[in-house]
C-alpha cells in the first residue's frame, strides 16, 4: 500500500472509535433485560459494535503501515497479525449475532478477545521500540485491552481509538524508516 494510505485509514479508525463510544453509551442507557435482541436498540447496539470492529481494523492496518519497517524483529508483525485476526474473529461473531438476532458464535468472540489481547501486548511493545510514534502511543495500544470491561470498556476503547487515530493521522511527516519521536 502507498504511504499516503495511513491518513485515510487513521480517519476510519477515528470513526470506528466514535462508533464504539456511541455503542457503549447506548448500552449503558438501555436497561438490562433477560431476553437479548428483543428490542430495536439491541440490534442497533450489535450493528454499531460490528461497524466499530470493522472500522478499527483499519486502525490496526494504519498502525502497522506507519511502523512496519522499524519493528526490529518479529514482535511487531506477530502482534499486528494476532490483533487483526483476534478482532476479525470478534467481528465475525458480532456479524453472525446481528444476522441471527441472537447470540451466535460466542466461542469465536471469546477466542478472538484472547488472541486480540496477546496481539495488543506484542504490538504495544513493538510500537514503543519502533520509536516512530510518541512513546505514549504505545500505551494507547495497550489500553485497547479495556474492551474486556463491558459497556464502560467499549466507551473507553472508543476514546482510545479516537486518540490513537488522531496520532496516526497527525504523523504525516513520519516516513517509514525515519524516526520522528515526540516525547
Image: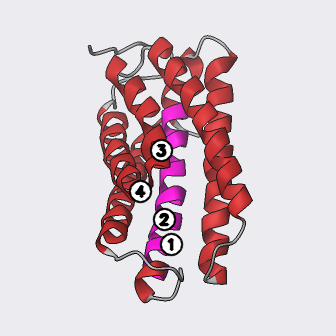
The residue nearer to you, when weighing 111 against 183, is 111
> What separation in Å lies between label 4 and label 3 (alpha carbons)?
8 Å
Residue receiving disc 3 = 59
CB of mark 4 within 8 Å of CB of mark 3? yes
Depicted 154 relative to depicted 48: above or below: above
Picture residue at 49% right of the left edge, 34% below the top: 63
Residue receiving disc 2 = 49
Picture residue at 42% right of the left edge, 50% below the top: 13
The mark nearer the N terminus, 3 or 2, is 2
**Disc 1 packing (10 Å; few <14; some 14–19; many ≥20):** many
Q: Is residue 46 left or right of residue 8?
A: right
> What separation in Å lies between label 4 and label 1 (alpha carbons)?
14 Å
Q: How is the image coloured?
A: secondary structure
Residue 46: numbered disc:
1
Instruction: Write the start and end of the magenta stretch as one range.
Output: 43-64
CB of mark 4 within 8 Å of CB of mark 1? no
Amino acid at each position: 500500500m502507498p504511504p499516503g494510505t495511513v491518513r485515510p485509514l487513521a480517519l476510519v479508525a477515528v470513526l470506528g472509535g466514535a462508533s464504539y463510544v456511541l455503542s457503549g453509551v447506548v448500552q449503558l442507557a438501555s436497561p438490562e433485560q433477560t431476553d437479548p435482541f428483543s428490542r430495536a436498540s439491541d440490534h442497533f447496539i450489535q450493528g454499531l459494535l460490528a461497524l466499530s470492529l470493522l472500522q478499527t481494523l483499519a486502525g490496526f492496518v494504519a498502525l502497522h503501515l506507519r511502523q512496519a519497517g522499524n519493528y526490529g524483529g518479529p514482535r511487531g508483525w506477530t502482534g499486528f497479525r494476532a490483533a487483526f485476526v483476534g478482532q476479525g474473529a470478534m467481528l465475525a461473531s458480532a456479524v453472525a449475532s446481528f444476522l441471527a438476532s441472537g447470540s451466535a458464535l460466542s466461542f469465536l468472540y471469546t477466542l478472538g478477545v484472547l488472541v486480540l489481547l496477546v496481539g495488543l501486548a506484542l504490538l504495544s511493545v513493538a510500537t514503543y521500540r519502533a520509536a516512530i510514534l510518541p512513546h505514549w502511543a504505545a500505551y494507547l495500544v495497550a489500553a485497547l485491552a479495556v474492551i474486556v470491561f463491558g459497556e464502560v470498556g467499549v466507551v473507553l476503547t472508543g476514546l482510545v481509538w479516537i486518540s490513537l487515530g488522531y496520532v496516526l493521522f497527525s504523523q504525516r511527516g513520519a516516513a517509514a524508516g525515519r524516526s520522528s519521536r515526540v516525547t
